[in-house]
């Protein structure tokens, strides 16, 4: 004897909560910005002090001459490309996760900066871009005169 289950259309539809859970699962379990060429957006840390804005980008395996830095208005853009190493035919890869290809990452700066005074250093795969804040964006102290 077989059991019959009554069909209920509402049960078939995904609830809003299930849809949101699925959305967040997909967003946080996959690498952000993954593209088909094997390269994803580089991880970036950005902070500011009283005098400057500093951006640190993780670019393992890259060289300084493979990265281009642009500041346009209040947006910092990092571009780069790393070439795929020569593939040897006699090797049978079991896993291949090395990143190669081009990337571009743009971030909005939290305040106006002096782009012409910006500096960049590249050490151990970490690119550090230091941008002094524009004079009008720096905090000012106003003295109070008493009468």
Image: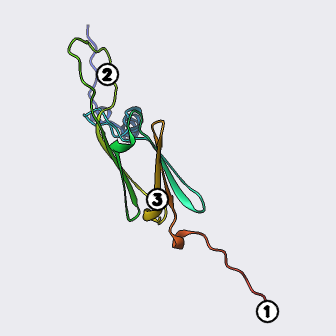
Give how far apart the Cα atoms at labels 2 and 1 are. Answer: 75 Å
Disc 2 versus disc 3: distance between alpha carbons?
37 Å
Q: Looking at the image, which residue is at 28% across and 25% down?
A: 6
User: Quick one: label 3, few (<14), some, or many (20+) residues within 10 Å?
Assistant: some
Residue bearing mark 2: 96
Among the two numbered marks 2 and 3 on one chain, the one whose residue lies closer to the N terminus: 2
For mark 3, what is the residue? 118
Residue at 79% x, 92% y is 147
Q: CA distance from mark 1 to mark 3?
A: 43 Å
**Closer to the camera in the image, 20 or 1:** 20
Q: Nearer the viewer, residue 26 or 46?
A: 46
Residue 118 as seen in the image, left or right of residue 89? right
Query: What label does residue 76 carry, if any?
Result: none
Q: Which residue is mark 1?
A: 147
Q: How is the image coloured?
A: rainbow
Viewer-side residue, 39 vs 61: 61
Q: Are marks 1 and 3 in contact (CB under 8 Å)?
A: no
Residue 110 rendering spot, x and y as whole percentages: 48, 60
Q: Which image quadrant is residue 62 in?
A: top left
Could you tell which of marks 1 and 3 lies nearer the N-terminus? 3
Is there a contact, CB below 8 Å, between mark 2 and mark 3? no
Which type of secondary structure does the marked residue at label 3 adopt?
A: loop
Residue 79 percent across, percent down from the top left? 33, 47
Query: Residue 136: x and y, percent?
Result: 52, 73
Disc 2 crowd, CA 10 A, few/some/many (<14, 14-19, 20+) = few
Residue 125 percent location from the top left of the image: 45, 37
Quadrant for residue 81, please give it: top left
Mark in front: 1 vs 3: 3
């Amino acid at each position: 004897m077989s059991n019959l289950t009554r069909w209920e259309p509402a049960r078939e539809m995904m609830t809003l909560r299930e849809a949101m859970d699925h959305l967040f699962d997909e967003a946080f379990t996959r690498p952000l910005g993954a593209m088909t060429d094997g390269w994803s957006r580089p991880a970036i840390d950005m902070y500011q002090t009283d005098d400057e804005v500093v951006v640190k980008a993780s670019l393992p395996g890259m060289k300084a001459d493979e990265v281009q830095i642009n500041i346009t208005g209040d947006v910092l853009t990092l571009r780069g490309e790393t070439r795929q190493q020569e593939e040897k035919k006699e090797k049978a890869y079991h896993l291949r996760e090395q990143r190669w290809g081009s990337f571009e990452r743009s971030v909005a700066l939290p305040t106006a900066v002096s782009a012409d005074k910006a500096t960049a250093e590249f050490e151990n795969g970490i690119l550090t871009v230091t941008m002094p804040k524009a004079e009008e964006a720096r905090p000012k102290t106003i003295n109070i005169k008493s009468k």
